[in-house]
Amino acid sequence: MQLLLNRSFYPVALALMLLLSACGSNSGSNPSYERTSGVESTAESVDELLNAASRLEGNEAAALILTAAEELLAAEAVDRVGLALARIENPRLLSATLQLRYVLAQADMALLQQRPAAAVNLLTSQLVRNVELQTDALQYRYYSTIATSYMQTGQISEAFAAFVEAGTNSPELRTQALNDAIWESLEPLGEEQLVEFSLNVESYESRGWIELAQIAKREQFNIKAQIDAIDQWSRVWNRHPATELLPSPLAELQIIWEQRPKRLALLLPLQTPAGNAIQEGFLSAYYQALAVSSEVPLIAVFDTSNVRNISAIYDEAVAGGADLIIGPLDKALVNQLQDMPDLPVPTLALNYADRLDAGPDNLYQFGLAPEDEMAQAAKLAWLSGYRNAAIVTPQTDDYLRLRGIFADIWREQGGQVVTEVSFSGDSDYAPLVKRLLAIDRSEARADRLLDLLPRSSLAFTPRRRADIDFIFLIANPRQGRQIKPTLAFYFAENVPVFALPAIYDGQENRSANRDLDGIIFTDAPWVLNSTDPLKEAMVANLRQVQGPLQRLRAMGVDSFRLYPLLRQLEMRQLDELQGTTGNLTMTANRRIRRELAVATFIDGLVTLFSTNPEASD
């Protein structure tokens, strides 16, 4: 199972290495060389070790060189590490213990140089043998380092197994850092992936970890339910190492629950369809939580439909006792919040300010930004091996702006935009597609040739341009149902088309959607998943809405579920949440970003891709 990660796991391995270096570095060392306790990792102490090594040979010299290299690694002096290790001319002649220390030093250096694949190759090479015969400290260091390397190369199952092995083989050395690392290795996996993962593990400890992760995922938006489920898990898995050292994010849940906001203020333009849709989602999630537990916050709703200055209504909400505010939705009002010197309570704005800085403390921003959707479409196309893009959008200022943003994203990745075309209204799309594919130029060349030659002597078949790898399309379903068949008519049926969520209206209209077959698009899991219990209840009890308002309802659901978890996301106690609008993460400037589900149309039906696009890298 592979999944590429952005976070670096090297600090985990480094911390474990530092913890164990004292007991691990003595293995195979020269007993006549005694170092003074408390000597710092300075150039002077390293030079002493290397000078002493120069007067020795074989394993005795190598042991001192490796101790020096380990001190240099602790100081992240990568250049000097390489020079020190180069003194060991033939590591194959060393003892098994020293060979392992040599490989670990090389692997740690590779991790510091952001070369995790090289670290994996080193740690699985023939120089590594009989690990099980080494000291507990050295085994612990080996398994934690290879686990870190696996994490950075996206090999989740291998990383998890290695972290577990580190604790199993050396139980007396188990630390909070190790249990946290095991937990972090499981965090990126969704519920379905955890179920699949559970089928391939057998040990008591591994099965317990996976069940604990499943509990945390299942109840991720309900802290009280998480706490109760973890207590029950601890009673069932009472011999599991996590019962003694619960992963830090789980151990802190009780404090987070006790400090949760008790009064929320919801600021929305209730006289608009968008504001109403968000409120419907928010309150539906609220009543779903209320059905599970009476310990839900009090809600006060404020209408911002005619608000031009946020200060008065914001102050009113705070004066009314709100200890967390959700909203506003209007971008201009969010800009005003960002300009304030400080905010008295945590505030989850439902749009993004124009400026990219974080703004005052307590300001969090969450929205359905098309920029997120375009960045994901670009990444998906790039990972599919495409490099030359054609862009098709409506001819309006907003869509032309989005066209420019996608072009910039694509070029920043290293791709080329070979052509850009725009359309107006729902008229005949043949001229647009001809222009896109340069069919019009091909026809013009033929006309000029026919003017010179007798018409009866020449047969002409137009040819499209051959330099388009894929088409990025911004269109609604009605427009897409005309553009896609027109592309096929003009010989581009095999050119991949990537689209934004707007291409799907959320309706299962198989006959009409056959004209969208082959289009790849991203969308909110809420829209693509018809079996979500809360969505089913809303469909049964609320007015029927199409795609755009469904996505806003999902945003309302997520905004309610996010409110107690903002601090955890900010402090990186949670890497991501599986929301109804997508997988949610928080950036350094406290903006919540979405990664949407990926789907395509097959025979008129929406079909989800079963793997994350990153997994194919």
Image: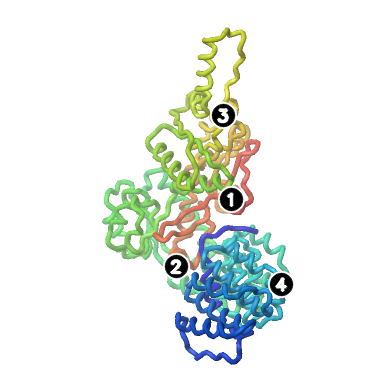
Q: Disc 4 on helix, strand or loop?
A: loop
Tally of numbered tags: 4
Find the distance from the CA under tag 3 to the CA under tag 2.
48 Å
Real-space Cα separation, disc 4 to disc 2, in angstroms: 32 Å
Residue 203: which numbered mark, if any?
Answer: 4
What SS does tag 2 mark? loop
Q: Nearer the viewer, mark 2 or mark 1?
A: 1
Left or right: 189 as drawn, with respect to 319:
right
* Circle 4/circle 2 CB separation < 8 Å: no
Residue 567 position within the rendered picture, expressed as x and y whole percent measured from the top left = 43, 66
* Closer to viewer: mark 3 or mark 2: 3
Q: Tag 1's secondary structure?
A: helix
Which amino acid is tagged 3? Leu
The residue positioned 65% from the left and 70% from the top of the image is: 162
Residue lying at 54% horizontally and 71% vertically, measured from the top left = 82
Residue type at tag 1? Pro
The residue type indicated by label 2 comes to: Met
Name the residue located 33 percent from the left edge and 47 percent from the top edge: 305
Percent x, y of residue 144: 60, 73
Amino acid carrying label 4: it is Ser
Residue 264 badge? none
289 lies above or below 34: above
User: Label 2: which residue?
Assistant: 571
Q: CA distance from mark 4 to mark 1?
A: 31 Å
Q: Is residue 168 above or below residue 420?
A: below
- Point out the tag, 4 or 1, that comes first from the N-terminus: 4
Residue on which the image places disc 1 = 613
Mark number, residue 487: 3
